[in-house]
Image (spheres, rainbow, N blue to C red):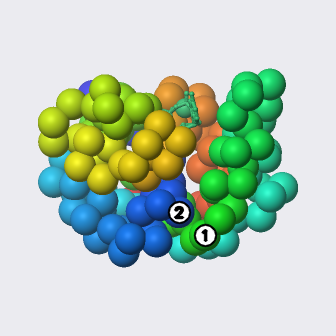
Amino acid sequence: MALERTFSIIKPDATERNLTGKVNAMIEAAGLRIIGQRRIQMTEEQAKRFYAVHAERPFYGELVEFMTSGPVVVQVLEGENAVAKYRDVMGATNPADAADGTIRKEVAKSIGENSVHGSDSQENAAIEIAQFFSEADIAG
Ligand code: DAT
Ligand code: MG
């Protein structure tokens, strides 16, 4: 199978608790390679655009506010089956439903403050990577 890329965000609840290294260790232990990484303060405009698919959901305002509440680490991950593999490593959206050993089970605080984002398809991965990275800032 060919190498695939996915897009990841370590969210403000995790950076605030100094858990970037712990999350990265779990990513790397799963065989995913961090081939691009940058720590940024997301603007409201960036967060709204990134989560535009959820614009009609009742939690959209809260989600945008949370994603801009502190620094995030945006990442490009590479590996076999990276999109599906990272969704497995992350665990369910609600940490109460997340399996043992997943990032959200180990680290997340709540369904809203759930520590990590990962793309849900190869198509969205490409769109999301392009929102935050140029090829010059990725080295596989
Ligand atoms: P995921 O991040 O697992 O892909 P999603 O795409 O359905 O989940 O939702 C995007 C984010 O929105 C999610 O990580 C946290 C927030 N969210 C989702 N459902 C929520 C809810 N019922 N209440 C509060 N925040 C929610
Ligand atoms: Mg999603």
> Answer yes or no: do the residues labelled 2 and 1 have beta carbons within 8 Å?
yes
Left or right relative to 42: residue 2: left
Spatial CA span between label 2 and label 1: 5 Å
User: Does residue 126 sit above or below 131 in this rendering?
Assistant: above
Q: Amino acid at mark 2?
A: Pro
Q: Quarter holding the C terminus?
A: bottom left
Q: Secondary structure at mark 1?
A: loop
* Quadrant position of ligand 1: top right
Q: Which residue is mark 1?
A: 70
Residue at the extreme right of the image, as rendered: 45
Amino acid type at image mark 1:
Gly
Among the 4 quarters of the image, the one containing residue 19: bottom left
Split into 4 quadrants, where in the image is the N terminus? top left
Whichever of labels 2 and 1 marks the residue nearer the N terminus, that label is 2
Check disc 2 and report the residue beneath it. 12
Crowdedness of circle 1 by 10 Å Cα count: few (<14), some, many (20+)?
some
- Residue 14 coordinates in the image, percent (x, y): 42, 62
Q: Percent x, y for residue 82? A: 35, 38
* Residue 123 position in % (x across, y down): 59, 29
Mark 2 neighbour class, 10 Å CA radius: few under 14, some 14 to 19, many 20 or more: many
